[in-house]
Image (tube, rainbow, N blue to C red):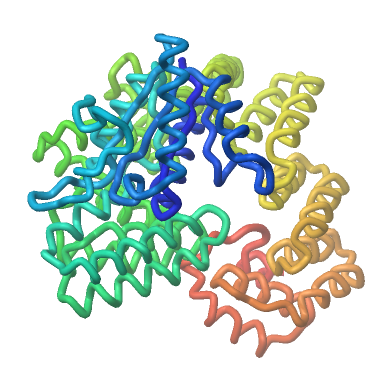
C-alpha cells in the first residue's frame, strides 16, 4: 500500500478534499497542502521533503491545475523523484471532463503529459474505486448510496456559457471546502447553487440537491432531508440513491415501515438497472434493510437479510458488527463477543475508526459476560478515539444510565457540557437525570441554565420543551413541542410521555 502526495490547484480544493477524506478513510497515508501543509515556510522545501517520504504522486488534472505554477512545480519535483526511484508512482487523475473544443488541456504542465495514461475521476464512484485498487487498498465510502454525482459532469451537459459554468463551479467548490468544518455555510452555498439551477430550469441536476439532503441528515434535520428526497422521488423516480436517502430519513424519523418500503424499492431499482456501480451498493442496502428489521424487533428477519450477502462481506467490519448486535439482542453474548472482536480487528486492519455505537455494544457484551475489566478497557478505547466529540460523551452517559450508574452518567454529561456549553440538548438531559432521581431542586437549576440559549434545530426545541416541563411552564412546553415537530427529531431520555405519566 502506497503513501501519497496529493497535488491540485486551489480552486479544485473541494474536489481534492473529497478524495483526501475518502483515501484517508480507506487507510491511505495521504498528504495535501491545505490539510497538512504549514503556511509561512519554504514551500519547495516542504513539497520536496514530503515527496521523498512517499511512494506515489497523485495529480488532480483540470484547467485550474494546468494554469497553476505551483502544480507545475510539484510535477517537476515528482518527476525528479521518479527518475531517482523507478518504483515511485506518478498517478495522473482527470477530474474535469475534456469536451470537444476544450483548449485548456493543450497546455502541458510537463513534456508528454497528454500521452500519459490517466485514471478518470470524472465518474467519481467508478474512478475512486479504480484509484484505490491501483494503490492496493479497499475503498471505504462514507455513504455508498447517497453519494452525490460528479457535479461537473452534470452541469457540462446543460450547455451553459463559460461565465455561468465558472460561477457554478466556484459555488460548488466553496460548498466542498466548507462541508467538513462549516456545514451550515456549506448548506448556504448549496441553496444558492440550487436557486441558480432552478432559475435555469435545470431540475435534473441532482448533485447539490442530494448533497443538501445529506447535510440535513448529518445535522439531525431529518424532516428537511425527507422533504428533499420525497420531492426528488417524484421528479426522478428511477434513481436508487434517492429512494435510499428517503429510507434513511424515514428511519431516523422513526417511520420504520416506510423506511423498509423505500429501501426495498431502491434495491429493486439497483437490480433492475444492472449498472455495475449501482450493484456495488447492494451490500450497503441489504445492511441497512437488516438494521430496519432490527429496529422493528424482528431479529430473525434481520439475520436472514444478512444471509443474502456474499460470503466475502464478512470481511467488512460494519457487517460483522451488526451480526454481533443481533446476537446481543437475543442474549447470545458469547457469540456477540466473537463477532464484535472480529469487527474490531477488521477496523484496525483498515485503519478505520469504529463508530461510537460499536464501542457501547462491545462494552455491553463484556458486562453481560461479567468481564468488567474488559468493559472498562472498551470504554477507555472509546474515550481515546472519541473524547473530543461531545455527542460521544452523551452516548456514554446513556450507556451508564442504562446500567444503573447514575453518578457516572452525570459525570459524562457534565463533560459534554464543558465541551459544548451552548448545547440545549446536553443541559436539558442533565436536568432530566436529576428530575428522575427526584432531586427536583437541582433539576430546576440545571433546566434554568437553558434560558437564553438559542434553539437552532427541531431537536433543540424538543429539549427546550423538556427543560420548560421541569420548570413547570406548560405554555412554553406546548410552544416548544409545536416547534420541534416531534416526528422529525431523535429523542433521548426521557420521552415526554414518560414525564406526563408521572
* Residue 187 percent across, percent down from the top left: 44, 67
Q: Which residue lies furthest to the bottom in this view?
A: 475
- Looking at the picture, tell me which residue is in the foreground, 109 or 126: 109
Q: In this view, does 38 lie to the left or right of 246?
A: right
Q: Image height check: is 5 above or below 266?
A: above
* Residue 274 percent across, percent down from the top left: 11, 34
Q: Is residue 95 left or right of residue 293?
A: left
Q: How many marks?
A: 0
- Looking at the picture, tell me which residue is in the foreground, 414 or 430: 414
* Residue 28 percent across, percent down from the top left: 50, 25
- Looking at the picture, tell me which residue is in the foreground, 479 or 353: 353
Q: In this view, does 366 lie to the left or right of 9?
A: right
Residue at x-position 79% and y-position 80%: 471
Q: Image height check: is 398 above or below 173?
A: above
Residue 322 appearing in the image:
no
Residue at x-position 41% and y-position 14%: 83
Q: Which residue lies furthest to the front in this view?
A: 111
Q: Residue furthest top?
A: 86
Q: Image height check: is 270 above or below 139?
A: below
Q: In this view, does 290 lie to the left or right of 252?
A: left
The quarter holding residue 292 reads top left
Residue at x-position 15% and y-position 68%: 160
Residue 44 appearing in the image:
yes
Q: Image height check: is 86 above or below 116?
A: above
The quarter holding residue 455 reads bottom right
Split into 4 quadrants, where in the image is the C terminus? bottom right
Residue at x-position 65% and y-position 35%: 360
Amino acid at each position: 500500500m502506497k503513501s501519497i502526495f496529493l497535488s491540485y490547484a486551489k480552486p479544485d480544493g473541494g474536489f481534492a478534499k473529497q478524495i483526501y477524506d475518502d483515501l484517508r478513510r480507506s487507510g491511505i497515508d495521504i498528504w495535501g497542502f491545505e490539510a497538512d501543509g504549514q503556511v509561512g515556510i519554504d514551500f519547495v522545501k516542504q513539497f520536496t521533503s514530503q515527496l521523498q517520504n512517499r511512494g506515489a504522486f497523485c495529480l488532480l488534472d483540470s484547467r485550474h491545475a494546468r494554469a497553476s505554477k505551483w502544480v507545475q512545480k510539484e510535477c517537476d519535483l515528482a518527476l525528479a523523484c521518479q527518475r531517482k526511484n523507478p518504483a515511485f508512482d506518478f498517478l495522473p487523475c482527470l477530474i474535469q471532463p475534456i469536451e470537444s473544443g476544450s483548449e485548456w488541456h493543450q497546455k502541458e504542465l510537463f513534456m508528454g503529459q497528454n500521452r500519459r495514461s490517466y485514471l478518470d475521476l470524472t465518474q467519481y464512484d467508478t474512478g475512486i474505486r479504480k484509484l484505490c485498487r491501483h494503490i492496493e487498498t479497499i475503498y471505504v465510502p462514507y455513504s455508498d448510496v447517497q453519494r452525490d454525482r460528479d457535479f461537473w459532469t452534470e452541469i457540462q451537459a446543460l450547455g451553459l456559457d463559460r461565465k455561468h459554468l465558472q460561477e457554478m463551479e466556484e459555488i460548488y467548490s466553496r460548498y466542498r471546502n466548507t462541508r467538513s468544518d462549516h456545514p451550515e455555510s456549506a448548506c448556504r452555498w448549496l441553496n444558492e447553487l440550487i436557486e441558480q439551477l432552478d432559475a435555469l430550469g435545470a431540475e435534473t441536476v441532482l448533485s447539490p440537491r442530494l448533497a443538501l439532503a445529506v447535510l440535513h441528515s448529518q445535522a439531525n434535520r431529518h424532516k428537511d432531508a425527507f422533504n428533499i428526497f420525497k420531492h426528488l422521488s417524484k421528479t426522478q423516480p428511477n434513481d436508487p440513491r434517492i429512494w435510499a436517502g428517503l429510507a434513511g430519513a424515514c428511519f431516523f424519523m422513526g417511520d420504520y415501515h416506510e423506511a423498509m418500503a423505500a429501501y426495498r424499492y431502491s434495491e429493486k431499482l439497483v437490480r433492475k438497472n444492472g449498472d455495475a456501480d449501482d450493484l456495488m451498493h447492494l451490500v450497503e442496502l441489504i445492511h441497512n434493510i437488516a438494521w430496519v428489521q432490527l429496529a422493528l424487533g424482528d431479529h430473525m428477519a434481520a439475520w436472514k437479510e444478512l444471509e443474502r450477502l456474499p460470503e466475502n462481506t464478512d470481511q467488512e467490519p460494519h457487517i460483522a458488527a451488526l451480526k454481533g448486535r443481533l446476537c446481543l439482542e437475543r442474549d447470545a453474548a458469547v457469540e456477540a463477543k466473537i463477532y464484535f472482536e472480529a469487527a474490531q480487528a477488521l477496523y484496525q486492519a483498515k485503519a478505520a475508526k469504529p463508530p461510537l455505537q460499536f464501542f457501547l455494544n462491545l462494552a455491553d457484551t463484556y458486562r453481560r459476560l461479567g468481564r468488567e475489566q474488559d468493559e472498562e478497557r472498551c470504554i477507555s478505547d472509546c474515550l481515546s478515539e472519541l473524547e473530543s466529540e461531545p455527542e460521544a460523551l452523551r452516548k456514554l452517559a446513556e450507556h451508564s444510565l442504562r446500567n444503573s450508574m447514575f453518578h457516572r452518567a452525570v459525570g459524562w454529561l457534565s463533560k459534554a457540557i464543558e465541551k459544548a456549553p451552548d448545547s440545549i440538548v446536553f443541559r436539558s438531559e442533565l436536568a432530566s437525570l436529576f428530575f428522575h432521581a427526584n432531586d427536583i431542586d437541582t433539576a430546576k437549576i440545571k433546566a434554568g441554565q437553558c434560558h437564553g440559549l438559542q434553539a437552532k434545530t427541531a431537536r433543540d426545541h424538543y429539549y427546550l420543551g423538556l427543560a420548560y416541563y421541569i420548570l413547570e411552564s406548560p405554555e412554553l412546553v406546548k410552544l416548544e413541542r409545536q416547534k420541534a415537530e416531534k416526528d422529525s427529531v431523535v429523542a433521548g431520555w426521557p420521552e415526554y410521555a414518560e414525564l406526563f405519566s408521572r
